[in-house]
Amino acid sequence: MAAIGSLVFCTDCGNLLPVSKGNVKNILHCECCGADNRDTASKTTVTQSKPSDFPSLLRQKLSIVQSVERHKVQTEAVVNETCEKCGRTEVRYSAVQLRSADEGSTIFYTCDCGHKWNTNN
């Protein structure tokens, strides 16, 4: 007789046996082949597995995720744009979608001299 969870099967024919009483002394009679089977449902089976036993693309993606502190993220890039205040030709900018999705982004420019301006594209 073999037990899978709370189900008990006949060792001779594999037929599902009547409900187990969970007692080793209990004999379960197979109605299919007539064999008498010892009730082994009372035995405890313990299994162990590691995450690596079940490979998963999702698990692999999660293992490469890195956390970044928001204030350390560089959100500005450098562009060739002339500063109206000091005339410098290289300024930093960032694009933000402030209006609805079907309208252009707002570009914020910042010069090293401290001058700031924006344009709506």
Image: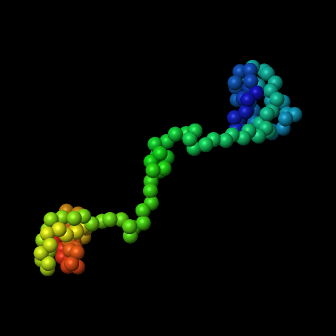
**Image height check: is 4 above or below 32?**
below
Q: Position of residue 68 (x, y in %)?
A: 42, 62
Which color scheme did the rendering employ for the protein? rainbow
Q: Which residue is found at the position 27% from the left and 66% from the top?
A: 76
Name the residue rendered at 15%, 65% in the picture: 80
Q: How many circles with numbers are drawn on the protein?
A: 0
The N terminus: image quadrant: top right
Residue depicted at 32% across the width and 65% down the height? 74
State whether residue 68 is above or below residue 115: above
Residue 20 as seen in the image, left or right of residue 90: right
Q: Residue furthest right?
A: 25
Q: Residue at x 69, y 40 (%)?
A: 47
Write down the quadrant of residue 19 in the picture: top right
Question: Is 75 situated above or below 38?
Answer: below
Judge left or right: residue 53 versus residue 26.
left
Q: Position of residue 59 (x, y in %)?
A: 49, 46
Quarter of the view holding residue 3: top right
Where residue 8 sits: x, y (%)? 73, 32
Task: Say which quadrant the C terminus sits in.
Answer: bottom left
Left or right: 111, with 19 as reference point:
left
In depth, the one of 103 and 13 nearer the eye is 103
Q: Is residue 101 visible?
A: yes
Q: Nearer the viewer, residue 85 or 104?
A: 85
In this rendering, is residue 27 above or below 89? above
Whether residue 103 is visible? no
Measured from the top left, where is residue 71 in percent x and y?
38, 70
